[in-house]
Image (tube, rainbow, N blue to C red):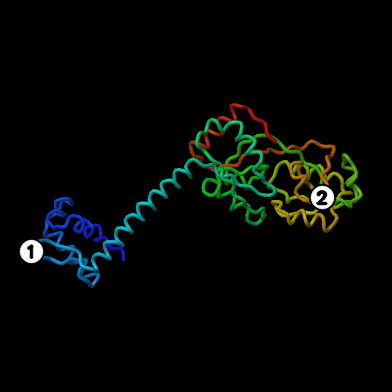
Amino acid sequence: MFNSLLPIFVCVADCGSFNKAAEKMYISPPAIMKQINALEKHLDMKLFDRTNQGIRLTPAGKVIYRHAKFLFDYSEKAIEEAKREMQMFETTFCIGSSLLNPCKPFMDLWYKVNDNFPGYRLHIIPFEDDHEGILSEISALGEKFDFIVGVCDSTQWMNHCNFQQIGTCQHQIAVPREHRLAQKKRLTIQDLYGETLMMVKKGDSKVVDNIRAELIKHPQIKIEDTPQFYDIKVFNHCVQTQNIMLTLDCWKDVHPGLVTIPIDWDYPIPYGLLYSLQPTDDIKLFLKIIQKENFNQV
């Protein structure tokens, strides 16, 4: 039913006169009457009775008037709601969270600096750790997410985001709970002899490539390439095959069927905040504050 002539119709009805409505809307009385005639023609109904004493709404006109006022009120409420939503969006940090990239480290930082962001809220947005779709999630920084927390030594990831390091994680070895190595407190490379070690393909992570170069010196260890980015399917495959897997200490609780054990090497990998290539001013401020405070949250 909505028509651009409805505001003129309501104004005429409220004023009770074409002339008064014309004065109020700063247009000529003939123009007002012409537009009312056009509305009546469009609706195929008479909206006003014209008499020598003035004009009054017809029964049909009263119905249109009532619903037009409702439409105007509803539109105003919609605009106010949209403004509130926009304001809330502009004062909300949206944090991505998944099994391999949980948001807790961000929360730990947030509660130390949130006094600098009065009125701000956090909105946690879950996403799936799918090795085929993770680049799409990373690319959504700035639109779907403001921050994602995770390890980042990936050339491909860094083509889609910025990164602020807040700590490091250490590479360790995950073994199924029934595995012969599961009871060990610490491993040596020699402990891995005779095993098939799962690790990501070569070429995307400098740190992982350095580990691969070290392992190649030990032909007694067979290397099985996994997808370029881990997801829960990789952890499940490790349990099902009873192979061992290169993992990180921050992922020790990802799969209950695996035990994560330190090994005698030192291959740390950066851990921190992923954010948009074009960050907003409030994101820049947040990063500046945590850099100044020199937080080191792993």
Query: At label 1, which amino acid type do we have?
Result: Asn
> Which is more N-terminal, label 2 or label 1?
1
Q: Specify whether 197 is left or right of 208.
A: right
Image quarter (top left, top right, bottom left or bottom right) of the N terminus: bottom left
Please report the residue visible at 42 percent of the width from the left and 49 percent of the height from the top. 81
Q: Quadrant of the C terminus?
A: top right
User: Residues under labels 1 and 2: Cα distance?
Assistant: 91 Å
The tally of labels here is: 2
Taking 44 as reference, is 35 above or below it? above
Looking at the picture, how far across and down is residue 101, in whole percent?
67, 46
Give the residue at mark 2: 258
Q: Amino acid at mark 2?
A: Leu
Across and down, in percent, residue 268 comes to 74, 37
231 and 29: which one is in front? 29
Q: Nearer the viewer, mark 1 or mark 2?
A: 1
Which residue: 33% across, 59% down? 71
Kindly indicate the quadrant of the structure image that contains residue 52. Answer: bottom left
Residue 126, compared with residue 59, is above or below; it is above
Looking at the rendered structure, the secondary structure element under dot 2 is strand
Q: Residues within 10 Å of mark 1 (few under 14, many from 20)?
A: few
Q: Read off the residue under disc 1.
A: 52
Of 243 and 99, which appears nearest the observer?
99
Is 206 on the left-hand or right-hand side of 223?
Answer: left
Q: Which quadrant of the view contains residue 17? A: bottom left
